[in-house]
Image: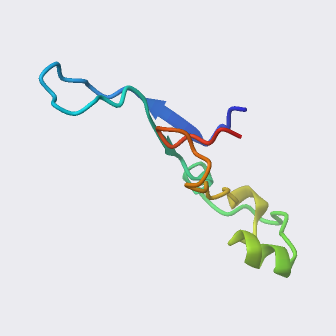
Amino acid sequence: MYDAQWRDYMPYVSPNDPCPPIRVKWYIVPPNQYINFQPMNLPQFSLDEALRKGTLWPALYSPYPSRRGTSKGGKSNG
């Protein structure tokens, strides 16, 4: 399953590099990069759920990927 917050790029791989190359690197773009200002009347999580998720607004929620169960390169298998 592809998540829209994940981006990838292919870094330069030198033929003289002594380390094994990492062909594809992954990173996450947080949702707050796409919201220029806070619109009025955004939906909100309940207070208990907001404390668990770390934000009051669902539009700004981004799940934190666990390092357990990840494949090489950081992208989750699930």
Q: Nearer the viewer, residue 17 or 45?
A: 17
Residue occupying image coordinates x 80% and y 63%: 42
Location of residue 11 in the rendering, given as x and y in whole percent from the top left corner: 31, 29
Residue occupying image coordinates x 73% and y 69%: 53
Location of residue 8 in the rendering, given as x and y in whole percent from the top left corner: 48, 32
Location of residue 25 in the rendering, given as x and y in whole percent from the top left corner: 42, 35
Q: Nearer the viewer, residue 59 or 54?
A: 54
Q: Nearer the viewer, residue 59 or 49?
A: 49
Quadrant where the C terminus sits is: top right
Quadrant where the N terminus sits is: top right
Give the residue at the far left of this rendering.
16
Residue occupying image coordinates x 83% and y 66%: 41
The coloring applied to the image is rainbow
Location of residue 16 in the rendering, given as x and y in whole percent from the top left corner: 12, 23
39 vs 15: above or below: below
Task: Determine the image quadrant of residue 59.
Answer: bottom right
Locate residue 5 relative to residue 51 in the image: left or right.
left
Q: Nearer the viewer, residue 61 or 22?
A: 22
Q: How many marks?
A: 0
